[in-house]
Amino acid sequence: MADKNIKIELPDKSVKEYKKGVTGFEIAGSIGERLAKDAIAIKIGEKFFDINAKIEKDSKIRIITLRDSEGVEIMRHSAAHILADAVTQINPKAKTAIGPAIENGFYYDFDMSPVNPEDFEKIEKKMLEIIKQNLKFEKKEITKEEALKLFKNNPYKLELINELDAKEKISVYSHGNFIDLCR
């Protein structure tokens, strides 16, 4: 019978035992309520994952918060997705291109009619509405074929997808009804 517990090594080199399939959020909660509240991602080995990712084997982990530079970058990346969601809700004809985190913030490229100064207030208000919904970001890996179908009406996403190898898994993030491609 396979062992149902796994060993998790924390940054202080302590090792704790958890049930196989434990999430980063559950580990953070077992360490402290404040850490669970602040946790936004988990680093397993050298890779970053959603805080709700299940851990299936012995691992070395680190809980990521906004006190970490990686946490700030993750939050900026999430803000770019929220910006894209807000803009496409306000202007459904807008086509999203890319929206990365950058050193001092984030941006998103759109193909749409020009934005006027008064539009910024509408966009900010919509972003705040989306944030208040407290929607979870969910990462999913899909095939190139699935991505091509999902983004069939967006030439910019199709261009990015077509640059990838056919066997490569493609990450998409969703929150609510909004789905975006991540490279």
Image (cartoon, rainbow, N blue to C red):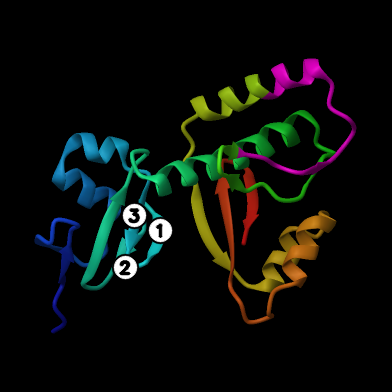
Circle 2 sits on which residue?
45
Quote the CA–CA distance across marks 2 and 3: 10 Å
- The reply to whether residue 23 is in sight is no
Quote the CA–CA distance across marks 1 and 3: 5 Å
Q: Is residue 110 magenta?
A: yes
Q: Position of residue 136 (x, y in %)?
A: 46, 42
Quadrant of the frame with the C terminus: bottom right
Q: Which residues are magenta?
A: 106-123
Amino acid type, mark 3: Ile
Q: Residue farthest to the right?
A: 113
Q: Position of residue 108 (x, y in %)?
A: 70, 42
* Mark 3, other Cα within 10 Å: few <14 / some 14–19 / many ≥20: many
Q: Do tag 2 and tag 3 residues touch (Cβ < 8 Å)?
A: no
Of helix, strand and loop, which one carries label 2? loop
Circle 3 sits on which residue?
42
Q: Quadrant of residue 12?
A: bottom left
